[in-house]
Amino acid sequence: MNKFEQLGLNPSILKAVEEMGFTDPSEIQEKAIPVLLNEDTDMVALAQTGTGKTAAFGFPLIQKINVSKKHTQALILSPTRELCLQITNELKNYSKFEKGLNPVAIYGGASITDQARQIERGAQIIVATPGRMQDMINRNLVDISKIEYCVLDEADEMLNMGFFEDIKAILSHTPKEKHTWLFSATMPKEVATIAKKFMRTPIEITVGSKNQGTSNVSHEFYLVNSRQRYEALKRLADANPDIFSVIFCRTKRDTQKVAEKLIEDGYSAAALHGDLSQNQRDLVMKSFRSKQIQMLVATDVAARGIDVDDITHVINYQLPDEIETYTHRSGRTGRAGKSGVSMVIVTKSEMRKIKSIERIIQQKFEQKDIPDGMEICRVQLFHLANDIKETKINPEIEAYLPGINEVLEDFTKEELIKKFFSVEFTRFFNYYKNSEGLSSPSAPAEGGSYGDSTRYFINVGSKDGFDWMSLKDFLKATLDLGRDDVYKVDVKDSFSFFNTDSKHTETVLSTFKDFKHQGRFINVEETTDTGGRGKRGGGGGRKGGKFNKGGGKSDFKGGGRRRSDSSGDSGKGKRTGNRNKNIESSIKRRRSKN
Ligand code: AMP
């Protein structure tokens, strides 16, 4: 008797289990399935996503449903459309050999009439988001008056998303005698209230300890200045060449901004947030699942229900406002028995949050230094060596070998290896060779001057049609500098101020020597004047729709397409003098292999 048989599952489910390749039940399955099969009871189960909880309630549910009857016998409420679809799919897999069972997903953003039609055909199990379910009840499109089982999945998430009233209203349409099974990753007061209000002496099951994150996730933090966040993120990615990650930002705007920067810098990244249309979000998720995207930059709300099993890293670009949210973020990795890393990029002023999170997850963070440039070069080099070792030889290459051999015939094996590696390594090396370390405990506080910085006066201002953003763009383009190399841009009426790191001073001053713009001489001088920069760069953040629309400059285009767009740009051909571009194209090419 295998371990699933011992749980009391019937042959059709066991056959599906075998087909899915599950060998051993997970802890939550071992604890919940026998109880739910053998006892008519309510249950509160504390388990993270990725612990196999869908099967923990799904197997008993399928076994208990009477497939000869068509009416709705079970309702599963879950927070997001993605989760609904995922649960429905899993249920279909589990019931593959259970003829006549029809689970139907009900969620917003899709045709309500189509969903009503599917229910009409007979849906013994409905998997629904609370909002759409409530809508369908109001329109008399569903009948849940005879359900025997109600599952509240990710109850804490549903309450976080403000579904309390909907859940209450939905439950009021269900019979009192039904059994409720509540699954939640954490047990905040609100969930306890639901359990108390709507459940009858539930059996409580806990996997791990209450409110604890998944234990196969290790937690690391990296202390940086806020201005270094983005550079730190890039280095973390570069030091982990096989990274497959979700990067969390606090706002939609930051999410879009970070994704755009990553794409611009040649990473396979995309944004996922609520300003994207459902269609765009679906496309992003499809690309992420198929690993065309290595770095998914997401808001907490949009990331709910990401059901991808082999995420290697969760990166907290910024910590969440509510520290409890950290548990959900880190729970996106370390799923299905795999290990994962949750990294936090943190500034000095946020350090106390790390302590609070440690108390919640009952695990210690490890403080780590952002990898330095040479360490990254070493990692990349060995990664390349391993890639070569694992690469299957393409037989088509045979035809070209005589010619290639002729070109390379004068070199020994050692020389060839050195040359071959140098192709990739030199550009990478050049990019990092003058870079500074990022984890500097003595680094100045947020908002203070950073490192060796120079402030300049420039004799153009708002009268000349500049705002801080357009002036920054103009300076970047004219000076051939990267997005973050020009900062603290402060535009006054007829003049402005800006900063660069001092290593660029010579470039700045020489570029603007005898420089004419639209027929007028532009003068740039070093200054010690702060320009009284009360409001950063003219204040008010970015105007216009650039980062706010989400739709227009679609981040989704970035991931896959950009990489192939750039594949022909070896960085050798066009010596435009743009140092960064050449280096970035080498990084792009490295990333284009996936
Ligand atoms: P869940 O926590 O239900 O989202 O499940 C996470 C992933 O683990 C899903 O891809 C399931 O198909 C998979 N899974 C569930 N139970 C098992 C099991 N006993 N053995 C292996 N994989 C499982």
Image: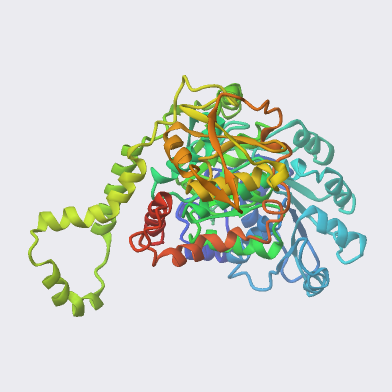
Residue 58 sits above or below residue 205 on the image: below
**Can residue 339 be seen by looking at this rendering?**
no
Residue furthest top as drawn = 442
Q: Residue at x 62, y 32 (%)?
A: 211
Residue 407 sits above or below residue 144 on the image: below
Residue 504 sits above or below residue 13 on the image: above
Nearer to me, 133 or 13: 133
Q: Quadrant of the C terminus?
A: bottom left
- The spot of residue 130 in percent (x, y) is 80, 53
Q: Residue at x 89, y 54 (%)?
A: 173
**Can residue 68 be seen by looking at this rendering?**
yes
> Residue 131 sits in which quadrant?
bottom right
Q: Residue at x 58, y 70 (%)?
A: 97
- The spot of residue 124 in percent (x, y) is 75, 65
Nearer to me, 233 or 77: 233
**Disc count in the image?**
0
Nearer to me, 535 or 97: 535
- The spot of residue 67 in percent (x, y) is 71, 69
Q: Is residue 59 left or right of residue 566?
A: right
Residue 209 sits above or below residue 34 on the image: above
- The spot of residue 341 in percent (x, y) is 47, 39
Q: Is residue 173 left or right of residue 431?
A: right
> Residue 184 sits in which quadrant?
top right
Way the structure is coloured: rainbow
Nearer to me, 276 or 127: 276
Q: Residue at x 80, y 41 (%)?
A: 199
Q: Quadrant of the N terminus?
A: bottom left
